[in-house]
Image (spheres, rainbow, N blue to C red):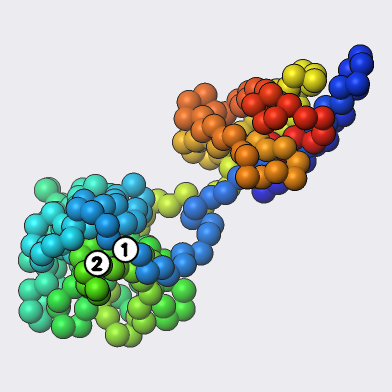
Amino acid sequence: MEKGLKKVFSAMGAVFCAVMMIMLCQVTNAVSYSEQTVTVDYDYQVIDSFEGVDAKYVLGYSDTGYYCCAGYVSRFYEEKFGVTVYNINMVDDKPSVYCYGKRAELREVKTPQAGDIMQDKDYSHVAIVKDCQGTTATLIEQNYKWTWNDTVYTVKNRKVLTNNHYFYRLYINGIAQSLDIDTTRPVIANAGCENITGKGYTVKADISDNRAVASVKVSTYFEGNKTKTISRVYTSAVNSLSHSVKVADLGGKDGYYIT
């Protein structure tokens, strides 16, 4: 979303300071997942993250344990659903699940949703579904990698055809489970600039969401010179933003400053 406001201040003497404020708010869940080939440069590298669960890669052998494909699926289901997943990639069988005091099971589905488990039809690899559009599912996974010219590669947001794989949904006590994904955009209101002088200004705005706002990033540059940009990330008390800009930090020239 975008809000804009322009104010011009004429001070005593020859100082003119103009401020144009543009505030942008992005929601990750509203952005389509683009498939990207990336390099694994070091052990324990976070290649991707979904709903707060990181997919980590190591350079060497990782067919078992924490950094294998099954390790990510197990960790994801433990953190998001409180369920233990085991017997993963058993030949000719789907994984098993366990939840203390409850009846847990995986059921095969043809149209997956976010949080479902993907399994190759040769039972060699598993992953978690991030999104499904039509017959194409987007995955988050570990240990999907190859080496070329001594460099290790993987694919972030890898896409697969649904009819070429198995997909399983978790049921607890007969009820299908789904992720509580936040798709509501944050709202910026009462955006404006105050205390505008030849030395700087203050940006203020009210920011709200249906959930807690995790962070707000504010960037400022002088008109026509985006190469020199000063940014700050607020991670507390971000629902009522008050951000001070000193034009001296950006060269102190007369003209428009964009925040």
Give residue 234's position: percent from left, percent from top: 51, 29
**Residue placed most toward the observer, 122 or 174:** 122
Q: Quadrant of the C terminus?
A: top right
Residue 188 picture quarter: top right
Q: Residue at x 36, y 50 (%)?
A: 51
**Image marks 1 and 2: residues in contact by CB distance under 8 Å:** yes
Please state which amino acid type lies under the numbered disc 1.
Answer: Thr
Q: Would you name the residue on which mark 1 appears?
A: 39
Mark 1 neighbour class, 10 Å CA radius: few under 14, some 14 to 19, many 20 or more: some
Residue 177 visible (yes or no): no
The secondary element bearing badge 1 is classed as: strand
Q: Is residue 166 left or right of residue 217?
A: left
Q: Is residue 138 left or right of residue 22?
A: left
In space, the residues marked 1 and 2 are separated at their CA atoms by 6 Å
Q: Would you name the residue on which mark 2 appears?
A: 152
**Residue placed most toward the observer, 26 or 232:** 232
Mark 2 neighbour class, 10 Å CA radius: few under 14, some 14 to 19, many 20 or more: some
The secondary element bearing badge 2 is classed as: strand
Q: Residue at x 20, y 83 (%)?
A: 121
Q: Residue at x 57, y 35 (%)?
A: 231
